């Protein structure tokens, strides 16, 4: 946990936190905080998935408790309080469909920030009563399943133990932070066979830096004033983009270290009135149904035409409409073939480059941020939504630092030294290098199979699940918005409800039919893996190292981590397993 001084002054203390377990502690000893807890279902994680599963399982009559590593509900929105943090999915799609949660709640704008999302989760608790059975600052560090008892034994960082028949992991796709060296940011290196066996340490010298340094996802709640300060941001993923928008107008000087350009699209942020939301709510049930029938879990889908069915003039008009409407429409409402056909993809990229290059005044900055030649096929990485990102670089105080051909060698007392010998001095540094994506939240929990092997060691070479909701060797364990589900190719709350209802129905079936536990077979898991790879290989995604193809950590396998066939098709596939529980070994009481 660190010394008391560190905990009292999280803003100015330079010590960098890397693991959730550093936050685990026991504030109480009663209720959900009790030791030797006995429950029917334990939900781990208090974001959208956790709230939905807790509510659904309790409603089904199961004694249910939630463990959450943070200090309150909200999942990533309790941790992600970095400057400018906001969601990249539009409301009303980005919320739960549980009527109590939306009938009496309105949003201030169509893309809420983290403070508004925290307020939303407080509202969910008010109408659903979640916190009374939630143990906060409870970090799971070990879990084993006893086949004789048919129960999981789950331990926390502060030493508590809970026993549960069903373990439902709602850690999400980005629960484990990743602090990496940029000498592993070379795409050619990432495809090297020799690299996959390396242990990549954090940069040397981080603890020597005398200024303020934090990972974006462990950013302190207390505001850090950057006015008049020399600031640095490492990384240009979603967090890096949003922090750039927040710091650009305030910092004395801001340098943004970029490995790969972020092929952002405009979100079209706007305020929402209570009146227009109340008027629209009569359509919400239909909207929530529609979002589950679309590829990405939004209320729009790919165009029914292919790119070259339209003339050049027709394509231009179509692109302009997608661009004007904003959000993910240019990504998931575009021509149906552009993620499969390289020639069509280049047309999509060229329009993107034309629109974004026009926003950047300086020619040198323009070529770094929006090059004429694509760094990778457009759309094979989840694009970030922004509202003023490129305009920040038109400021004299904001500078992109390309890491093409050079790397971050180390930190030192005054800042960062690059491999070319250049020194960059800072007062404040944000490490926005992302997460051990999709699988990291589960592998960090100390989960062990019935054969005694840890999930972390099993998934080092390759991740295997069945249906993107279960893992062979881990009976009665379920996961949501994690590996081999729609996850990053979809809207979070939509995926959560499609998977969550399925999990709840499986659990209800087990309870009704006297089933002690179910365990997906190894054969079924291998077939699901083949299905995941088949869908991926139809697309251009395997051409690029991305969150979809193994994520940020170069030690992880280069493999598809998400179901690439779309949310609607996914829902139909997992439903086909019921009611017979095909692919599972079934052990009755």
Image (cartoon, rainbow, N blue to C red):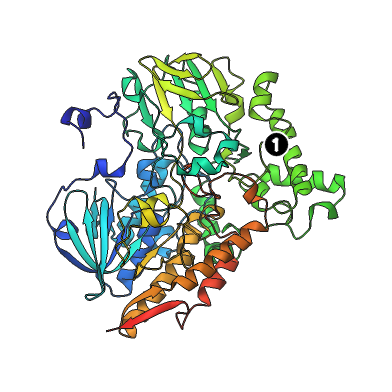
Q: Residue at x 44, y 65 (%)?
A: 469
Q: Position of residue 208 (x, y in %)?
A: 32, 20
Residue that mark 1 sits on: 374
| Residue 315 x %, y % | 81, 47
- Looking at the image, can residue 362 be seen? no
The answer to whether residue 317 shows anywhere in this view is yes
Residue plotted at (34% across, 19% down): 209
Q: Position of residue 546 (x, y in %)?
A: 56, 45
Residue beneath the point at 15% across and 47% down: 27
Q: Nearer the viewer, residue 437 or 554?
A: 554
Identified at 44% across, 40% down, the residue is 198
Q: Viewer-proximal residue, 282 or 247?
A: 247
Instruction: Report the front residue among 393 and 180.
Output: 180
Label 1 residue SS: loop
Residue 372 is drawn in which quadrant? top right
Coordinates of residue 100 in the picture (x, y in percent): 39, 63
Among all residues in the image, which is located at the extreme front?
A: 194
């Amino acid at each position: 946990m660190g010394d008391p001084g560190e905990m009292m002054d999280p803003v100015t203390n330079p010590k960098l936190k890397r693991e959730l377990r550093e936050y685990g502690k026991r504030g109480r000893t009663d209720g959900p905080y009790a030791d030797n807890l006995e429950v029917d279902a334990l939900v781990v994680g208090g974001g959208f998935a956790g709230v939905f599963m807790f509510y659904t399982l309790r409603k089904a009559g199961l004694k249910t408790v939630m463990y959450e590593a943070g200090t309150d509900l909200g999942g990533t929105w309790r941790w992600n309080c970095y400057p400018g943090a906001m969601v990249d999915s539009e409301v009303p799609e980005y919320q739960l469909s549980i009527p109590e949660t939306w009938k009496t709640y309105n949003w201030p704008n169509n893309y809420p920030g983290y403070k508004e999302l925290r307020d939303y989760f407080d509202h969910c608790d008010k109408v659903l009563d979640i916190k009374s059975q939630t143990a906060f600052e409870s970090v799971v560090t070990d879990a084993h399943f006893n086949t004789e008892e048919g129960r999981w034994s789950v331990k926390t960082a502060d030493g508590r133990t809970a026993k549960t028949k069903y373990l439902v992991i709602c850690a999400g796709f980005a629960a484990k932070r990743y602090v990496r060296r940029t000498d592993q940011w070379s795409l050619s290196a990432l495809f090297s066979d020799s690299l996959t066996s390396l242990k990549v340490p954090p940069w040397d010298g981080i603890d020597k830096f005398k200024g303020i340094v934090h990972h974006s996802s462990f950013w302190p709640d207390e505001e850090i004033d950057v006015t008049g300060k020399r600031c640095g941001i490492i990384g240009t993923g979603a967090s890096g983009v949003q922090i750039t928008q927040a710091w650009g107008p305030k910092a004395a000087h801001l340098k943004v270290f970029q490995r790969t350009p972020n092929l952002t699209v405009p979100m079209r942020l706007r305020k929402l009135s209570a009146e227009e939301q109340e008027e629209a709510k009569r359509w919400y049930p239909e909207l929530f149904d529609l979002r589950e029938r679309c590829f990405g879990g939004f209320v729009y889908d790919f165009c029914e035409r292919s790119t070259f069915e339209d003339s050049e003039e027709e394509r231009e008009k179509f692109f302009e409409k997608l661009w004007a409407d904003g959000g993910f429409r240019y990504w998931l409402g575009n021509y149906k073939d552009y993620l499969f056909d390289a020639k069509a993809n280049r047309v999509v990229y060229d329009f993107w480059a034309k629109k974004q290059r026009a926003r950047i005044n300086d020619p040198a900055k323009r070529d770094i941020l929006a090059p004429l030649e694509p760094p990778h096929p457009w759309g094979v990485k989840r694009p970030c939504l922004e509202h003023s990102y490129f305009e920040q670089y038109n400021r004299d105080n904001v500078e992109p630092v390309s890491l093409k051909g050079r790397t971050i060698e180390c930190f030192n007392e005054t800042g960062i030294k690059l491999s070319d010998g250049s020194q960059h001095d800072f007062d404040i540094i944000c490490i926005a290098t992302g997460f051990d994506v999709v699988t990291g939240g589960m592998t960090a929990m100390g989960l062990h199979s019935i054969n005694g092997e840890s999930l972390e060691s099993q998934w080092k070479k390759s991740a295997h699940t069945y249906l993107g909701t279960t893992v062979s060797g881990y009976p009665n364990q379920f996961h949501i918005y994690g590996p081999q589900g729609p996850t990053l190719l979809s809207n979070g709350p939509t995926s959560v409800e499609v998977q969550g209802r399925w999990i709840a129905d499986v659990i209800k079936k087990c309870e009704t039919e006297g089933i002690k536990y179910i365990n997906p077979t190894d054969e079924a898991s291998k077939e699901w893996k083949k299905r995941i790879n088949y869908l991926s290989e139809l697309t251009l995604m395997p051409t690029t190292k991305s969150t979809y193809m193994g994520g940020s950590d170069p030690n992880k396998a280069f493999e598809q981590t998400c179901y690439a066939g779309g949310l609607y098709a996914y829902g139909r596939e997992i439903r086909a397993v019921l009611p017979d529980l095909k692919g599972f070994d079934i052990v009755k009481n």
